[in-house]
Image: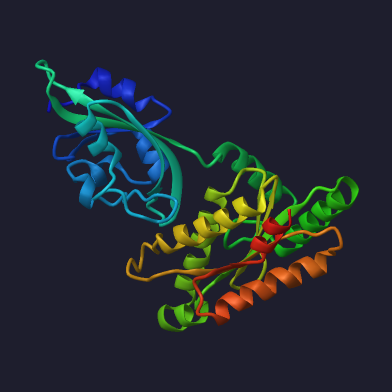
Amino acid sequence: MKNVDDFHKTLLDNLHDGLYFTDRDRRIHYWNKAAERITGFSASEIVGRCCPDNILTHVDEHGKVLCLSDCPLVAAMDQGKSVEREVFLHHKMGHRVPVLVRASPILDDDGQVVGAVETFSDNSSKLEALERLEELQRIAFVDPLTGVGTRRYGEEMLHSRMEESRRYGWTFGIMSIDLDRLKEINDRYGHDLGDEALALVARTLVANVRSFDFVARWGGDEFLVIVTNLSPANLQALAEKLGSLVAASNVPSVPDLQLTVSIGATFSHSSDTVQSLLKRADQLLYDGKGAGRNRVITDLTAITSAE
């Protein structure tokens, strides 16, 4: 394939979306500045590598690796037309980032497919998240290790959601999320690695909930996620997705370390207090850990059936 000349490289490097193109064997020949920004990987780390064995390892919402069996680039080249999908890529810091990818075939002068170009845009509402983070930092409600809200801030958010529920009848959901075997990680690899694992889980949660949802570090190895405007079935699906994405992530300094989380998810009831809601979510979480960890336990099926 022809190299990108300086003029066109300047144009491509000023795009807001990430962009790269490959030959027919999916070897990457170009990687623009936005791709570096979104993924954390520089062009020197990516160019020359092949998609099937590269370090991006796109996965779907269930954690299934797409490069070998369901690659958008392959689909675009085989079908001879553009393909658009929502996937999750592996950031250099270890967490998964939701992206919208658009792959299109590249044709030579004879109309033969010689490669593909893929653009991808960050779907994690970064601007909203950054604005929220700046506000949290201003009022000192940010957990310094993970960058998410503190327990104090989480308690205020819970009381606010509960008051809205009483006044307007709005329900909301919460997830108690616990990083499995943190003590074992600390004992084997040291507390710095344990801290790195906690920060990775926090980044995964923030990147994959909506900008108006809320994530707090609730305790040493526990997080609380508060979600609104979501059905019980969608809360169940979100909890399972978050569990799968954490399991598909890795700590950069110890790539073979398998991280998992246990999740207890529930919806608010009209008779709930903050304490009763938290107690129910915690019990579901403990049920999951008692059943072997790496599980999502909810009472949402009963709620859905009753509706």
Left or right of 234 on screen, residue 92: left
Residue at the far left in the pictured view:
110
Q: Could you say where residue 223 lies in the image, as x and y percent from the top left?
A: 62, 65
Left or right of 198 on screen, residue 213: right
What colouring does the structure picture have? rainbow
Residue occupying image coordinates x 20% and y 25%: 106
Residue occupying image coordinates x 31% and y 43%: 42
Residue occupying image coordinates x 57% and y 75%: 288
Q: How many labels sit on residues? A: 0
Q: Could you say where residue 35 lies in the image, as x and y percent from the top left?
A: 36, 37
Tell me if I can see residue 140 in this picture: no
Q: Is residue 64 above or below residue 190?
A: above
Q: State which quarter of the image contains the N terminus.
A: top left
Q: Quadrant of residue 220?
A: bottom right
Tell me if I can see residue 261 in this picture: yes
Q: Is residue 217 above or below residue 210?
A: below
Residue occupying image coordinates x 75% and y 72%: 279
Left or right of 164 on screen, residue 19: left
Q: Could you say where residue 252 lies in the image, as x and y percent from the top left?
A: 36, 62
Q: Could you say where residue 104 lies in the image, as x and y percent from the top left?
A: 28, 27
Q: Is residue 213 above or below residue 125?
A: below
Residue at the far top in the pictured view:
109
